[in-house]
Amino acid sequence: MQDSYDCIVVGGGPGGCATAALTAQAGLSTLLVEREKTPRFHVGESLMPETYWPLKRLGVLEQMQTSPFVKKVSVQFVTSSGKESQPFFFKQHDPRENSQTWQVERADFDKMLFENAAAKGADCYDETRVLEPIFSGQRAVGVKLQTQDGKKREVRCRVLVDATGQTAFLAHRLALKVNDPTLQKTAIWSYFKNARRDPGEHGGATIILQTRDKKSWFWFIPLSGGITSIGVVADRGLLRKERGSPDAVFQQQLAECEVLSRWLADAQCNSRYHVAKEFSYATKQRSGDGWVLVGDAYGFIDPIYSSGVYFALYSGELAADAIIAGLKNDDTSAAQLGRWCAEFDAGANWIRKLVRAYYSKDFSFGGFMKEHPHYKADLTDLLIGRIFHDSAGQIFNDLDPWLDRLEADQPSRDQPTMKNS
Ligand SMILES: Cc1cc2nc3c(=O)[nH]c(=O)nc-3n(C[C@H](O)[C@H](O)[C@H](O)COP(=O)(O)OP(=O)(O)OC[C@H]3O[C@@H](n4cnc5c(N)ncnc54)[C@H](O)[C@@H]3O)c2cc1C
């Protein structure tokens, strides 16, 4: 490890690995540090189809195509009454090379990205924890870190990238985190062998199932080796530990979901139950002099549409471009390093609105599409992640008033009703 780098990236998830690979490839000296030993376990297995483009730019497409990762060509929603929507096949309205994506074991996927950053020339160290940032006035100039052998040292840089995921070490340090009071959710999940699967290509789909009382929803993500990742998400009160162990609380919610219970009739749980809490938040400043946030450290919306890894990779890519251009002109100002954020936010906001739609009382994709079938292509675009262009989000011209009408007709008391702002 050198004493100083052009760029230090903290966090070896998809966001950090994307930034480090691209800055190193552009010839900038880059340090990427990950506190865990790689490969490390992580939630977030279902990829959005648009993830294809950052993966292509990073040069890992061939590895993905020859990997044992399950191929994902569709998503589906199951309502509280057990009605299964028509699957949304990504290739249906506009077939493209990215109409197929993957369900990934994150340990393997993230390790591939970490090794790719090293192959592109970044100095990559796992089991290396950043203890704190070093500032000179307002400017980030390096980090204090602890290396694999337990020794502490300082390393200097021209640009510091916080890609520490939900740890959000800079956002915490600088008090930038803003929690979304309407999205204070908890998730409990585990891994099951022999869950029922569609025998055709739809067998790789992510399926979102709402429980009978609509107070929670399950994800169903088929992985390789006949394993399925299954998790439940609800307001934190419903899944709190006073109601029992994670296993017991999971089973309470499963009893509310007849379709999934049927699919799991012959399945065996083959892992412990994991819990994640209060994972949705934004940050009020995304870059400063000499620093920039990417991935979950920048903000996280909600897992329902599987946008997290895509946003991490894409924001990592955009941040890398800003860093490369900035260092060429000796401009590492907040404006330069965050020049991409407004455009990124505009696209991400469509997903935020779609999340809020899902959590609105009595919302169903089927119900809305029945009245507005011409929006099928727009909706599929959102579910694919094709959101970073001017005509994205047109569906909300009619979806917003439709949701307002639902809310006016049936105000909810038992679930926070969210305005589609
Ligand atoms: C319940 C749940 C379900 C989800 N499901 C999906 C899904 O199906 N599909 C999807 O796309 N997304 C999903 N996500 C989101 C997804 O997990 C994240 O968006 C994604 O992992 C973000 O990548 P990242 O690189 O920003 O952060 P991470 O992948 O979290 O990587 C950050 C890394 O930084 C390291 N780190 C932290 N602090 C330090 C430090 N001080 N020093 C060094 N290293 C440090 C961590 O160890 C970690 O490896 C889900 C999230 C949740 C909560």
Image: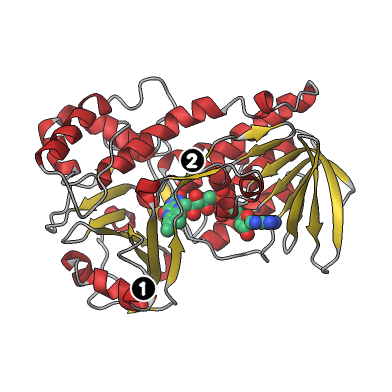
- Disc 2 packing (10 Å; few <14; some 14–19; many ≥20): many
Q: Which labelled disc corresponds to residue 192? A: 1
Taking the image as drawn, is residue 395 in sight? Answer: no
Image position, residue 238 (x, y; %) = 30, 65
Q: At numbered mark 1, what does the secondary structure look like: helix, strand or loop?
A: strand
Of callouts 2 and 1, the N-terminal one: 2
- Relative to residue 216, is residue 262 depicted above or below? below
Closer to the observer: label 2 or label 1? 1
Could you tell me which residue is drawn at 24 percent across and 24 percent down? 397
- Disc 1 packing (10 Å; few <14; some 14–19; many ≥20): many
Left or right of 367 on screen, residue 237 = right
Q: CA distance from mark 2 to mark 1?
A: 27 Å
Image position, residue 83 (x, y; %) = 13, 54
User: Which residue carries the number 2 mark?
Assistant: 52
Q: At numbered mark 2, what does the secondary structure look like: helix, strand or loop?
A: helix
Q: Which labelled disc corresponds to residue 49? A: none
The colour scheme of the drawn protein is secondary structure
User: Ligand 1 appears in which quadrant?
Assistant: bottom right
Could you tell me which residue is drawn at 29 percent across and 34 percent down? 420
Indicate the quadrant where residue 250 lies: bottom left
Q: In terms of depth relative to the viewer, which is nearer, 413 or 260?
A: 413
- Look at label 2 and name its amino acid: Tyr
- Relative to residue 215, is residue 172 depicted above or below? above
